[in-house]
Image: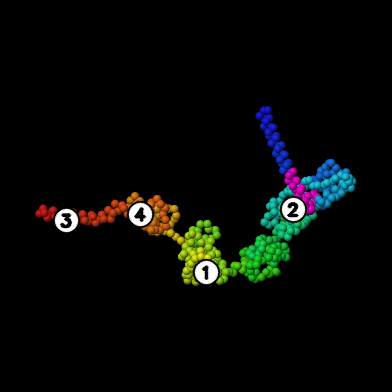
């Protein structure tokens, strides 16, 4: 076999295998749909369905066309329009058994219908779609609606030009399956624009965005849509933020002291139900404390803490112990209350379970947690001697650099003397520890010479003048 023939044969094999795989996949999907339809008591016979009639030792495929007239072998014709599958199955099998009692008849759905529908109105784009007979209205809504599509009023126009309106919110929230029908061949789905869309937030069971029907108000929003109040809800401080209203500027807030059954909500209003917990007194923890978003504490934070009346500081510190880190100087913490500074033993509260504090937390207290900071001292022949913040895993060169480097006129060859907090010598290649002293030696010859050069010059000048005077006198 030539190379060209081999390639042609290989291509033909691949092509046939691809077609076979596609057929298998299609058949598998069709078989799965058929099983779902057969198991559904409400499946309605649809134009495009393919059924199989088994009787005697033979089988016959029966396809339902748009007339819905089904010919059952030579036994008669049955009108399948608007009939459920289970009803049609019973009629077909009874008809065959009536004419042939020994036929062993069985009538089953083999392939559910695939057909066209149309979507229009307030949708992502108007178009024609191919769907199967198990497709419900909700799946089309979820895929093709926009933020302005109404979920409460979706119009379906049948091929007979009959219009029906469906409430998909009621279908999903209340389980009204009749509001979420199967779609039929040549249906037109008309997405209508939403009416009043409002938001509810705060202490309710189901906060969110909802589309209200005509006549529904604040009470309906809270009780029906948001499923009622939480036990901590404070209905004496209800806030309504008006976004679009001829009487208010956008963002204007209206305050209600009860659930007013007559209060009318406008589109895009936001209702907020506060909590009694927001009325608890507050205090503040400030300084070297970690907020929830901090992974590495580097800056000071101020945290607002709500507390129960008569709570003592030992309880509060234990409740918020996770806020403290390795850089929190809990030994030097203090409380600021009305300008007065009060000391408090945080370490004992955290680590001694038997400790009880009689110091109660008061509103607007500020618990100050200083940063624990270590230093390294750099002295001697450097540009800026002083104490510098300790950084782990650094050698003496790092701290000499912080101090501006060696003064070349005073220090030769980078000579240093390093001692730890106990005065013991530290090797030059070792990492510097907290409270280490680094002394840059003053060992330059020119520096010492310059220090005493003026004195030496003056002395030599005097000596030379004296000798000159002496020899002058002798010569006379």
Q: Residues within 10 Å of mark 4 (few under 14, many from 20)?
A: some
The count of marks equals 4
Cα gap from disc 3 to disc 2, whole angstroms:
124 Å
Earlier sequence position, callout 3 versus callout 1: 1
Tell me which label, 4 or 2, sits earlier in the chain.
2
Q: Relative to 434, is 131 on the left or the right? A: right
Residue 236: x percent and y percent?
64, 70
Q: Is residue 46 magenta?
A: yes
Residue 405 appears left or right of 56: left
Q: Sequence order check: which comes first, mark 4 or mark 1?
A: 1
Residue at image coords 33%, 51%: 412
Q: Which residues are magenta?
A: 27-48
Residue 354, image x, y percentages: 52, 67
Of circles 3 and 1, the one toward us is 1
User: Which residue in the protein does label 3 denote?
Assistant: 466
Q: Quadrant of residue 461?
A: bottom left
Residue at the disc numbered 1: 356
Q: CA distance from mark 4 to mark 2?
A: 85 Å
Residue 466 quadrant: bottom left
């Amino acid at each position: 076999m030539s190379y060209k023939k081999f390639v042609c044969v290989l291509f033909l094999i691949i092509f046939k295998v691809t077609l076979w795989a596609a057929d298998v996949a299609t058949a598998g999907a069709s078989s799965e749909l058929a099983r779902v339809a057969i198991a559904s008591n409400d499946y309605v016979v649809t134009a495009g369905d393919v059924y199989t009639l088994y009787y005697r030792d033979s089988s016959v495929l029966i396809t339902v066309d748009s007339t819905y007239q089904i010919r059952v072998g030579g036994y008669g014709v049955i009108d399948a329009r608007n009939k459920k599958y289970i009803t049609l199955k019973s009629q077909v099998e009874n008809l065959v058994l009536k004419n042939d009692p020994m036929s062993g008849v069985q009538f089953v759905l083999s392939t559910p219908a695939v057909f066209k529908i149309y979507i229009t109105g307030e949708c992502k784009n108007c178009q024609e779609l191919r769907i199967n007979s198990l497709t419900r209205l909700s799946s089309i809504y979820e895929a093709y609606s926009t933020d302005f599509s109404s979920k409460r009023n979706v119009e379906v126009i049948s091929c007979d030009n009959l219009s029906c309106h469906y409430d998909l919110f009621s279908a999903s929230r209340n389980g009204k399956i009749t509001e979420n029908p199967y779609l039929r061949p040549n249906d037109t789905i008309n997405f209508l624009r939403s009416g009043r869309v409002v938001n509810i937030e705060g202490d309710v069971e189901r906060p969110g965005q909802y589309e209200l029907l005509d006549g529904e108000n604040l009470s309906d929003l809270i009780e029906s849509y948001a499923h009622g109040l939480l036990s901590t809800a404070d209905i004496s401080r209800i806030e309504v933020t008006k976004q679009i209203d001829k009487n208010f500027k956008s963002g204007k807030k209206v305050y209600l002291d009860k659930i007013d059954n007559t209060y009318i909500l406008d589109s895009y209003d936001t209702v907020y139900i506060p909590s009694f917990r927001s009325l608890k007194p507050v205090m503040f923890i400030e300084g070297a404390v970690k907020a929830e978003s901090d992974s590495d504490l580097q800056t000071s934070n101020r945290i607002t803490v709500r507390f129960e009346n008569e709570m003592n500081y030992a309880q509060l510190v234990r409740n918020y112990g996770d806020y403290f880190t390795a850089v929190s100087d809990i030994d030097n913490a203090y409380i600021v209350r009305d300008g007065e500074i009060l000391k408090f033993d945080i370490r004992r509260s955290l680590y001694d379970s038997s400790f009880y504090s009689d110091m109660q937390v008061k509103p607007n207290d500020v618990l100050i947690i200083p940063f624990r900071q270590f230093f390294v001292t750099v002295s001697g022949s450097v540009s800026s001697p002083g104490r510098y913040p300790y950084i782990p895993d650094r050698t003496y060169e790092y701290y000499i650099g912080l101090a501006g480097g060696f003064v070349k006129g005073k220090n030769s060859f980078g000579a240093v003397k390093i001692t730890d907090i106990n005065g013991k010598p530290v090797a030059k290649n070792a990492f510097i520890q907290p409270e280490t002293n680094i002394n840059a030696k003053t060992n330059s010859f020119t520096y010492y010479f310059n220090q005493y050069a003026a004195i030496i010059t003056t002395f030599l000048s005097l000596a030379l003048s004296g000798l000159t005077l002496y020899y002058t006198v002798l010569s006379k």
